[in-house]
Image (spheres, rainbow, N blue to C red):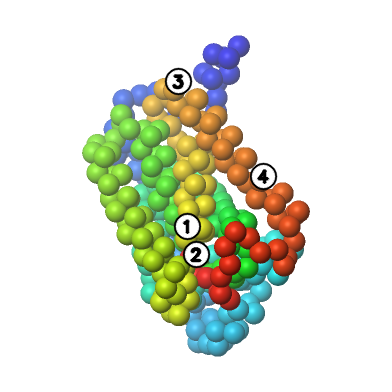
Amino acid sequence: MIKISIDEFPLTEEKGQKNYLDRYRCCPPPLFIIFTSILQVMMFVYYTLVVPSSEDLLSSPLIYRPDKRSELWRFVTYGTLHAGWIHLAFNILVQVLVGLPLEMVHGSLRIGILYLVGIIAGSLGTSVFDADVYLVGASGGVYALLAAHLANVLNNYSNMQFPSLRLLAVAFVATTDMGFAVYDYFNGMMFGLPVSYIAHLTGALAGLTLGLVILKNFNQKIQHHLLWWISLGTFTACIVFTIIFNILHPFPYLGIGQASNMFVQ
């Protein structure tokens, strides 16, 4: 019975020796990353030119605020806002370079879910460990895409050319940015605001665990099914824990870390 359920599992693809490069498709076009990037630019222009005051950004109905956690949309919509053009440019550059290749293979639906879940994981994780901060920025989603590349390699290693180089490139981008985020967290130099490394880490964890669950697996090896269940259990446990934590600890609970008025991430 267990063997039948594994063989019929719907998230895996038919087994074959097709090269991973042959899986890239431009039809349907990878619209999610493009649409998301355009939306973020439009929101940045609006808050820069129409309402340029930083206080207007802080009072935006889209920003994540610990005292407004009952307004659930804020756990997602803060990802459309950015604290400055460098912050915006870096996030868009990385999500285009990293997200488009994934979207061309795995489709807009899977990548859209990964990205949005990374955004949500960033705010949920921050609500637990840095509970007294505001959040703007899409780095939770960007780090979910970076970690999803690791999940993609684990799922499809034998079909890829130079999989180790893929991991090295992603690791270089992630460690460079993460190193800056940790440094900036303690120094608060970027736009005069500290960076929330918690949102980066929780977004990456969501991208890795959920990526192993929903990204296409062209190998369909039996050990991957065990990894699938471990990843699903880890992801579910973390999400359920943070949701329950938020319900049981309403504002003004202060988490493990305390911070200044607003964090970019």
- Counting residues from the start of the chain, the first of labels 4 and 2 encountered is 2
Figure check: 38 above or below 205: below
**Is disc 4 surrounded by few (<14), some (14 to 19) or many (20+) residues within 10 Å?**
few
Q: CA distance from mark 4 to mark 2?
A: 22 Å
Is residue 39 in view from this perspective?
A: no
Figure check: 52 above or below 25: below
Q: Nearer the viewer, mark 3 or mark 4?
A: 4
Q: Position of residue 75 (x, y in %)?
A: 63, 61
The quarter of the displayed image where residue 177 is located: bottom left
- The amino acid sitting under disc 1 is His
**Residue shown at 38% from the left, 42% from the top:** 150
Q: Secondary structure at mark 2?
A: loop
Q: Secondary structure at mark 1?
A: helix
**Is disc 3 surrounded by few (<14), some (14 to 19) or many (20+) residues within 10 Å?**
few
- The amino acid sitting under disc 3 is Ile
Q: CA distance from mark 3 to mark 2?
A: 38 Å
- The amino acid sitting under disc 2 is Ser
Residue wearing tag 2: 196
Discs 3, 2 touching: Cβ within 8 Å: no
* Left or right of 191 in this view: 60: right
Residue wearing tag 4: 240
The quarter of the displayed image where residue 224 is located: top left
Discs 2, 1 touching: Cβ within 8 Å: yes
Residue wearing tag 3: 222
Residue wearing tag 1: 200
Q: Secondary structure at mark 3?
A: helix
Figure check: 56 above or below 130: below
Quarter in which the N terminus is drawn? top right
Q: Position of residue 219 (x, y in %)?
A: 39, 26
